[in-house]
Each structure stands twice: as structure tokens, then as C-alpha cells.
Image: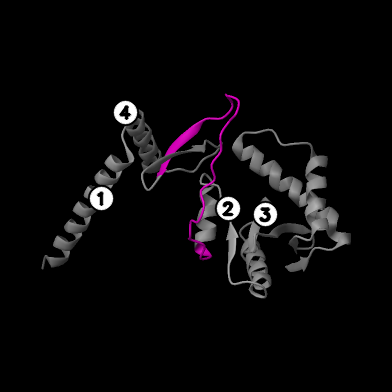
Amino acid sequence: MEIVHLTEERLPDFQNLYIEFFRELRGKQGWKPDEEESYRKEAESYFRRGDVIFLAYEREPAGFIRLSSREGCFWIEELFVRPEFRGRSIGRALVKKAEEYVKKHDDAVYLFVLPQDKDAIAFWKRLGYDVINTVELVKDLEPSERITFHTVELLGECFKIFRWKGEKFTEEERRFMELLEEFYKKEGTKEEFLKIMNRTLKEWLEEQLDDDKTP
């Protein structure tokens, strides 16, 4: 495997990978992708403005990672490995290359990850990414029937996440989201939710303590 910094002559490889990335993402979301030419122009614009982009090759283009610098911080914007090359540690190698670059300029790198993408979350956590610093919010200005949601929470605050095709939620996770939705529909409050969770967690911890004391 070879990892290279993107150059002018390799720009078409990045553009094609960028198109594949969005084709796969939109498929998961159940949305129709944009025209390929718009993605091609977008990919070129990132290169022209100076984003740091690394390409991985295994005799042919296998994946890429793109870094941008915003508000004094480095962000991993996209990481993509073509399906036929997955399971070969290419994604891990691309992340390592990006981190080595950032270390020359800063001591942290940030990224966004969609909460529905459990594989991505597991991947990033394995690499040590575990601080949630922001929550992305959106307001639909026009009703959209093509989007349905799951109910989730963060410290008792109710949020929604898009439903995806081929989701990998466990039965326990699905049941939890269903119960959350019922709770909030019945006008359950953040304070009530936190009391329930604190009580349940305390009971569980007390049980563990009792078990530890049992000879």
C-alpha cells in the first residue's frame, strides 16, 4: 500500500473516490445523489483551496482522507475506503498519516460522525476518538415526507436522528429509542428522565457492590 499527498496529476483519482464516497453515503441515507459533475467540481475546489488530502493506493486508488483547517482547528472532513479494499487497515493507515501531519501544527484533530453510522463510530473509538464536543442541529423550513426519525437523548435532552437504510441497531437499542419516543410523547421531562436514569444506575451499582461483598 502507498499513501501519497494529493497532487494535480492525481486529482482525477480523488474526484472519482469522492463521487464513490457520496454515492455510498446517499444510498445509506436513502437519498438520491447529486450529479457526478457537482461532486467532481466540489472535490477540485477543496484541492484548489489547499485542503490536505491523502490518497491510498494498492495498484489502484483505494481510498482517501481529507483534512481542512477551520477556526484554528484541524478537521477530518471525510475518510473513505472503497468496499473491495476494506478490512486491510487502509482506513487506519490514512488516519495515522493525517494525524502525523496535524501533529506538526497542532495537538488535536476534530471530526463529525453521524450517530446512525455505528460502524464509523466503532472505528473512531478504536482509534481513541471519544470526546463529544458539539451537537449538530437542523430545522426543516419546509415539511419533508421523505425523512423519518429515531428519538435519542443526550443528558435527557430529546433529539432526532435520521433513519437509514440497512441500520445496524440492536434490538435493545431499537427498544430504547421506542421507549424514549413514548416517554417524550407523554410529555416526560428532562428532569424526570434523569431521575429515572440516576435511580436505575444507582440500584445497579448497589447490586454490584453487594455482589462484590458476597463471599
Instruction: Report the residue at 74% width, 67% height from top.
Output: 3
Residue 102 image point, x, y percent = 66, 70
**10 Å crowding of disc 4: few (<14), some (14-19), many (20+):** few
Magenta stretch containing residue 145, yes or no? yes
Is label 2 in contact with label 1 (beta carbons under 8 Å)?
A: no
Figure coloring: one colour
Callout 2: few (<14), some (14-19), or many (20+) C-alpha neighbours within 10 Å? some
Name which of mark 2 and mark 1 comes first in the sequence. 2
Q: Residues within 10 Å of mark 1 (few under 14, many from 20)?
A: few
Q: Compared to 188, does 73 lie above or below?
A: below
Q: Residue at x 64, y 56 (%)?
A: 86
**x, y percent for residue 101:** 68, 71
- Quadrant into which the N terminus falls: bottom right
Q: First in sequence: mark 2 or mark 3?
A: 3
Foreground label between 2 and 3 = 2
> Mark 2: which secondary structure?
loop
Residue corresponding to mark 3: 80
Residue 193 covered by magenta stretch? no
Residue found at the very far bottom of the displayed protein? 104
Magenta segment range?
126-153
Q: Are marks 3 and 1 in contact (CB under 8 Å)?
A: no
Q: Which residue is mark 2?
A: 112
Amino acid type shown at disc 4: Lys
Tag 4's secondary structure?
loop
* N-terminal label among 3 and 4: 3
